Image (cartoon, rainbow, N blue to C red):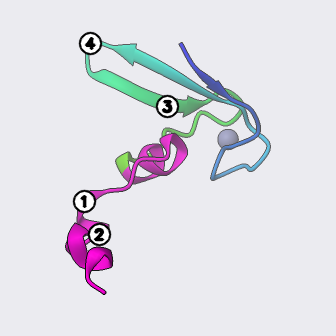
Amino acid sequence: MRFWFKRCPRCRQGDLQGESDSYGSYIACMQCGYILSTGQEALLLGIRQAEEEPAPARQQAAA
Ligand SMILES: [Zn+2]
């Protein structure tokens, strides 16, 4: 189980808790009960979504 303190995107003060149940895993605020969307989870976890990065990876290699 993971925690992120004061990272709730809705109430701004709430502590987020990563949980999992029969529906899968999710991240919820312990203070206001807000459940993060998939995109917000990705942001929190530092995961970049593929659709946000359309540029080819080798672009920087070209001089
Ligand atoms: Zn909250």
Q: What's under tag 1, amino acid-wise?
A: Ala
Q: Earlier in the sequence, mark 4 or mark 3?
A: 4
Q: Nearer the viewer, mark 1 or mark 4?
A: 1
Q: How many angstroms separate mark 4 from mark 3 (CA)?
A: 14 Å
User: Badges 2 and 1: C-beta atoms under 8 Å apart?
Assistant: yes
User: Badges 1 and 4: C-beta atoms under 8 Å apart?
Assistant: no
Q: What's under tag 2, amino acid-wise?
A: Glu
Q: How many angstroms separate mark 2 from mark 3 (CA)?
A: 24 Å
| Quadrant of ligand 1 in image | top right
Q: What's under tag 4, amino acid-wise?
A: Ser
Q: Is mark 2 on a helix, strand or loop?
A: loop
Examine the rendering and report whether any part of residue 1 can be seen.
Answer: yes
Mark 4 neighbour class, 10 Å CA radius: few under 14, some 14 to 19, many 20 or more: few
Q: What stretch is highlighted in magenta?
A: 39-63
Q: Is residue 17 above or below residue 10?
A: above
Residue indicated by mark 3: 27
Image quadrant holding the C terminus, namely bottom left
Q: Earlier in the sequence, mark 3 or mark 1?
A: 3
Residue indicated by mark 4: 22
What secondary structure do most residues of the magenta stretch adopt? helix
Residue indicated by mark 1: 50
Residue at position x 67%, y 36% from top?
32
Mark 1 neighbour class, 10 Å CA radius: few under 14, some 14 to 19, many 20 or more: few
Residue closer to the observer: 8 or 31: 8
Q: What element carries label 4?
A: loop
Residue indicated by mark 2: 53
Residue at position x 25%, y 59% from top?
50
